[in-house]
Amino acid sequence: MATSAPPIDAVHAGHGHELSFIRKYIFSTDHKIIGVQFLLLSLVGLFLGGMMAMAIRWQLGFPEGSMPLGGIFPETMVSGGVMLPEFYNSLVTMHGTFMVFFAVMPLLVGVFGNYLIPLKIGAEDMAFPRINMWSFWVAVIGTVIMMAGFWVEGGHSQAGWTQYAPLSADPQWTGVATGQQLWLLSIAVLGLSSILGATNYITTVVNLRAPGMTWFRLPLSIWSLFITAILVVLAIPILSGAAIMLFFDQTIGTSFFNATAGGQPILWQHLFWYFGHPEVYILILPAMGMVSEVIANGSRKPIFGYHSMVYAIIAIAFLGWIVWGHHMFQSGMNPTLGMTFMISTMFIAVPSAIKVFNWMGTMWRGNLTLHVPMLNAIAFVAMFVIGGLSGVYMASTPVDIYIHDTYFIVAHIHYVLFGGSLFALFAAITFWYPKMFGRMMSEAWGRVHFALTFVFFNLTFWPMHYLGLQGHMRRIYDPSQYEFLQHLSGTNRFVTISAFLLMVSQVIFAANFILSWFYGKKASENPWNDNGLEWSTPSPPPHGNWPDVPTVYRGPYEFSSPEVEEDFLPQHQKLPGDLEPEAAGRGS
Amino acid sequence: MNWLLPPGNSTFAGDIDFIYYVILVITGIAFVIVEFGLLWFVIRYRRRPGRKAYYTHGSMKAEVIWTAIPAVTVVVIGVMSGGVWNQVKGRNAAPADAMVFGLTAKQFEWNATYTGADGRLGTADDFVVRNQLHVPVDQPVLIKLATEDVIHSFFVPNLRVKQDALPGKTIDVWFEATEPGEFEIACAELCGLGHYRMRAFVTVHTADDFARWMAEQTAAAAAGE
Ligand SMILES: [Cu+2]
Ligand SMILES: [Cu+2]
């Protein structure tokens, strides 16, 4: 068969001798094991980030109250049952850091990039399996360094996940030295992990597609992960470089960002957001791709406007590089630049709208199967739209004067990252769980989890729009200090209680995830009647994925095709009229 | 819980708020179309045994429509916003007859500098009042915003004013209050331990009142030296 040489490791490991436990499950080079390792690590990150949010919400809802479990923290964090402002600032910093770098990003890119790319393009493994293994273990090292910050003298960084200089550049402003340095070191190390992973993804998608898997037969999840990997390779080095510069400001007395010695504090913001806005798309594009798979499957219909969807992904990724200034409208940047960045930012609404309407077009006249992944995918669309629309308010420079750095932006980012990315992840995890673990998750408990999460998510984050419109600043330890925020204490308490219930609802997901692993119904090869190549091999797939790499005859979304009786038509299924791909195989 | 903005007491507050309400209406319409559309599809196209979904790969016409409409809409919002932005924060936005004040932030307070009798900053008769910015009503005011340490953000919700103070730079901020009263100043950019209590006041006086206050303070400052 016309297939290029599979990776050496995969051949060795896949078909030969038995591997030791350590080589098979710990230092594994199998992309599926690495995907699951990333999954477990980043679910822990997600849990920690969530618990930090609970502590933050407690402080905002009950500023005078004695904190539950406050006693387990040392006096330097919680004193006499009351959280200290410096610990609050650390929590705000680390909640953002964990959710972005240790939860959502690895969940989307680390987990599903690893798991799906080879399985969906028909490769036996990644192009560089050993580099892939390193990408995981380097991420573990990064996580350990970041966690260590909580135990060092002076506590963890208090400069916000955005690390604005000079607050972050000189220990005299926050009293944090070591924690701050560990933060920067961890981010640089984590950056290496991301770059290793992304290089692998790009190489794999370009070189290892199965015969017949042309670019326009690629599933949208792979398109989005591929484009995301390009963003990672281009954006992450900027962050790593900036973090190293800031580290030098902290440790060896350079002054890149320190105005007193001639540095430019605003340079940090430019560097950070030049990484940071593409990062926003790193955190949403894979979600969009995976939601597309689930919506086509649940609607039993081809994706509406597949080509527009691909071009929209590319357009979003491109626009992502010329909008970073919208985070800096009030920063003192030249106001003329404000105009430029406003217009480029507004235009992101266009590809985003194309995607939303195409998802709706896919559901239109479908035969909607509302399985748990589909419910979460629909919620993704419904919530992402709110996050997208609230973005228009901040893109408008004059309106941004008022709502910048208020709870309006907190509402916005959570509608995009929780309502968007996290609902997409619930869809993706429940959809591919049977493939990963060979067992089905409970459908009934999945529904309960979905319903509670959907309700409490909205009860938590919708009122934050109101808080922001009333002028409530973000990142403040005690809103009761201000006269004009007095009337918001009831809303703050309401949000806090909703957030607690939202967190408690996740216990159902955790229990369903863990218990199904042992007691779930055995999964068949293709439990969702899907078309992707990953469903043409046993659940879970063996090392090497297929005895022989499959051949692809059509695009991934041939649901309800008139050519066959069933309402799905897998990519590898050969119909009488189908031609073999040319000898060259994987052409364009 | 509502989507209205609290009262704005500066000359440009109305313009900013107007754009906000335009966006509110536009996004409100988009919100209703998408959310109710989704809900309608979920009900209308629920799985029924024996039925097959309509097999289609899309429609060029539909793609053009839903590309063009958002594109035109955002250009309209952009152009409207641009005008107001220039008026509030443009390079030479501050009116020429504006009265000048200094405001210097530091962890965690705002120090307002007054020009004294000569009407100019940086002269010997300047005086500083901590956390109190007193200005006259119906008179454009130009604030020379600076910071001694980290980035802070000068935020007066009622005046629709927000501007970061950047170390090493002095930034011009202007406004014209339309009503006398006392309004809170907040710090909107995380600046350390006391960020949450970096509170001060803008006191807007009637013209007579302001003259009286200024005379008192100038005399007191002179006596103090
Ligand atoms: Cu951005
Ligand atoms: Cu401040």
Image (tube, helix red, strand yellow):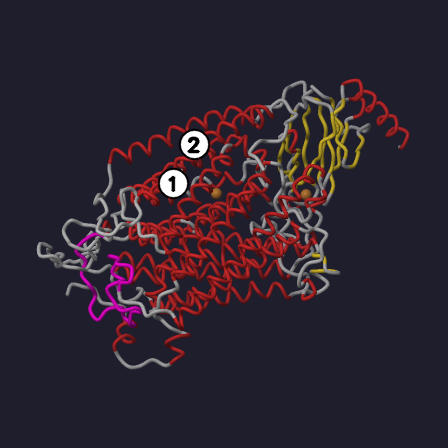
Q: Which residues are magenta?
A: A526-555
Instruction: Tell me the chain of label 1.
Output: A
Q: Is residue B218 left or right of residue A421?
A: right
The reply to whether label 2 and label 1 mark residues of one chain is: no
Q: Position of residue A400 (x, y in %)?
A: 55, 34
From the image, tell me which residue sits under label 1: A352
Residue A546 lies in the magenta-colored region: yes
Corner quadrant of residue B56: top left
Q: Position of residue A262 (x, y in %)?
A: 63, 44
> Which residue appears at 65% of the width and 19% of the height?
B96
Q: Which mark is residue B29?
A: 2
Which residue is outermost to the left? A577
**Does the residue at mark 2 contact the one at mark 1 (Cβ under 8 Å)?**
no
Q: Is residue A570 left or right of residue A88?
A: left
Front one among A211 and B76:
B76
Which of discs 2 and 1 lies nearer the camera? The answer is: 2
